[in-house]
Image: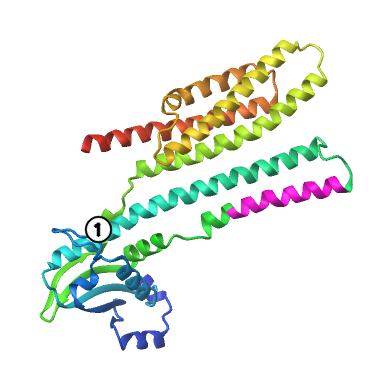
Amino acid sequence: MKTKKDKLIVNQREIELLGKYYEVDNENRIVTMPLHYDKASDLINGKIISKDNYLFDYDELTTINNMIKRVPIMYKINIDIQIDDYEDYEPEKLLSGFNDQMELNQFNYIRENKLKFLKAGMLLIVGIFILFVVGYGKINKWFGSSEIADVYSEIFDIFGWVFIWETVTITFLTPSELSVSSNMFKRRVLNVSFSNNEGVVAQEDLGTKSREWESEKRLERASRWSLLISGIAYLATGSINLVSSVSSLYEILSNLESGISIGSILLIEALGLAIIALEILGGISALCRYMGKRYLKIYSNVFAGITILMAILVLVTSLGSPRMIASSLVTIAISILYLFGYISNIVINRRYKTKE
């Protein structure tokens, strides 16, 4: 019976070349990579001194990564680290140091990701804001009807799309080196062993161990994404609603409709502007908590509840305005997402405090 592996096409010449230097099991599609070192200290980060533990050198992990890339993706890999002189280093602690370095890489990867997605989010907000202003301006003829006005609007339109494209580039087209490194070990390396002239002295199955490198649980990841998305959404909708609200207020006051008192109009618009202010502050609060900072802590405790109540109030008193109804519903949805991220973040932080 043919397996999925059997259906993958392998360049036999490439396997023949690898077979000159590595041990290749073609039946099970496993490549054993022997890495030779004269001394155990060559593997250790000499700048980090610990009496009881040995942290694996990051440059050596990079070297191993580069070697893994040379093996066809349909082959799994066993890494056999052969050391002539272990000096005073214990093989088990060398293996532990390797695992610690891989786990530390995960934490660094999460920090890199946070900054990357925050930067992408800020660029997205600016891009959406510019495109909205250009589109809204064209509808309301802010730029006039001359050819020069069209040129100006096209220039700003290009600026907006540049910000959007940069967001896509950062998010999808710029992979993290730490992410690539970690994923290669998880998906391709079966086990890592340390050996000497007599044979294997320490070995570990990475299929099980690599699960411990996941430094974020599902709830933590969900909380982080909820805070990021709600923070970006709050800032984007807040800035967009500010433009449309001010413009709408100006138009309404310039052309008052019969049957509607100016007091009712001002009340609705005042509530709308209050929600916009809350949205902008909420976006800042969510992104601060996303980055692990607790600015606006007291404010964020009551923010989502106040925003939802005010959005419902505007929804009830919107006088059938489609813009106000849509804006209120979007605000309520984002607030619910923010509440989930905020509450789950508090729960996670309390768990860590309890463990400490």
Residue 297 visible somewhere in the drawing = yes
Q: SS for tag 1?
A: helix
Q: Amino acid at mark 1?
A: Asp
Q: Is residue 169 above or below residue 257?
A: below
Marker count (numbered): 1
Q: Residue furthest right?
A: 146
Q: Is residue 4 magenta?
A: no
Residue drawn where x is 29% and y is 80% of the image: 27
Q: Is residue 57 positioned above or below 36 on the image? A: above
Foreground of the two, 190 or 176: 176
Query: How far across and how far down the image is residue 210, in percent?
Result: 28, 59
Residue 117 or residue 53, whichever sits in front: 53
Magenta: main secondary structure equals helix
Residue 241: x %, y % from top left = 65, 31
> Which residue is labeled 1 in the image?
100
Left/right of residue 137 with respect to residue 323 in the rendered view: right
Side (left or right) of 74 relative to 96: right
Q: Which residues are magenta?
A: 148-166
Vertical position of residue 184 compared to residue 122: above or below: below
Residue 267 position by quadrant: top right
**Front-most of residues 317 and 269:** 269
Is residue 2 among what the camera can see?
Answer: no
Q: Position of residue 305 (x, y in %)?
A: 47, 22
Q: Quadrant of the C terminus?
A: top left
Residue at 80% in and 47% down: 152
